[in-house]
Amino acid sequence: MARRRIPPYAVRKFLDDVRVGNHERAAARADELAVWCSGHAVTRPQTPAVVLAHGEILLRNEDLLRAVSYLEQGLSMLDETGPHEIIGNGDHHRVLLVSTLLQLGRYQEAAHYLTPMEDPSGPLDTRLAALRCRAQLAAIYGNPEGAHQFLNTAATVAERVRGMQAPAMVDADRACLLATQGRLFEAMAIADRLFARTLRGGHGDRARWAAASTAAVAFTLSRHAVDQGRGYDAERFLVAGIAAVEQAPSAYGVAHMDLAMARAWRHRGDFVNAELALRKAAVAFSRLGCRPAAALVSLEDACLNEARGTASATVNLFERALREFEEIGHAWEVVALQRHLGRYDELAQTSAAVDAGPSPTDMRASRLARMLG
């Protein structure tokens, strides 16, 4: 059966729809055009453009693993064909790819794509994205001071980018980094200023970005506020995160909401609801393929069992979390978990002598959480 010929203007219309955000209309033609381009119905430079646009649509639909495959393939093809009139040299799609690889925990692959993004003569928004990714990698590998240096440079670049989105991105990264360092008051001050900008409402991609950024910061700060005994702040950030997720729902955002709620339930002593929320988060992160977030779920599962006093399973669960963090290269979490496991016998013996106050197992779980920032 002969392949049906699709006119070239259909390809241009598809690419324009993706570029301006008409993703639903573009998605209806994405698979057909991708198959068509695998034949010989379009000129060669249009083929990587369609593949990259298809990857962008998959990413929007949270099909992360397939999206990475399409984005990698399209960028590889674009290196051979040269820039395209609509997508240029692929800077935008390279940013999407690197961000997704970080989400999946594929850090070495992400670092590989950062080098061309750091060209001083390149677009400012691309250089900004590269600096933010470098900061994230530095924090992951246990170098928070290096991460702050990258963010300082990113803040300088962001000042030269038009609009409020670029500086807000850097502020969001800074707030999360400070929270993981245990510098909660500084993180909350930045987050409060950030939310004054991101919670103004809006529409389209900018509103979705604002909601996702708000949720990411809010849930991170909520978890750390719980660990530092700041219940009011934990509650208000949790509420802000839930409102943001409701404004722009996503499987990833909902899963992080469940993870934050699981920690809140655990510290309230409601282990049943904590476990239910944790199970939902585990299923979602597993489906998405987000290994760093899945490792956080494993850690929270261990802390939950420790708080329950189920010693027989707790050590195994902490060891599982340790393995998961080791596999993806999270240096700080690995060191903290090794230290905690090494002290577990000593802490268990000490807890037997405690007659009053909070549950010893709760104290151990909170101590580990503080060690992890």
Image (tube, rainbow, N blue to C red):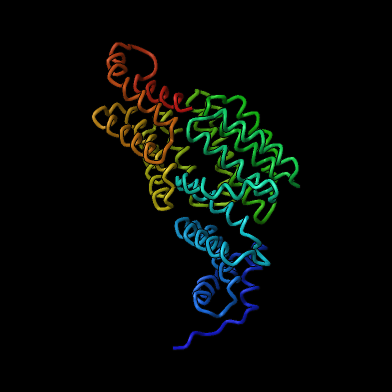
Quarter the N terminus occupies: bottom left
Q: Could you tell whether 270 is left or right of 57 in the image?
A: left
Q: Quadrant of residue 87?
A: bottom right
> Residue at point 52% right, 85% down?
4
Residue placed most toward the observer, 265 or 342: 342
Q: Position of residue 195 (x, y in %)?
A: 66, 38
Q: Quadrant of residue 155?
A: top right
Total marks placed? 0
Farthest front residue in view: 80
Q: Position of residue 76 (x, y in %)?
A: 52, 61
Residue placed most toward the observer, 125 or 217: 125
> Residue at point 65% right, 31% down?
190
Q: Considering only vertical position in the picture, is 314 above or below 244?
A: above
Q: Position of residue 347 (x, y in %)?
A: 32, 17
Q: Could you tell whether 362 is left or right of 77 in the image?
A: left
> Residue at point 55% right, 43% down?
242
> Residue at point 31% right, 36% down?
320
Q: Position of residue 226 (x, y in %)?
A: 49, 28
Farthest bottom residue in view: 1
Residue placed most toward the observer, 40 or 59: 40
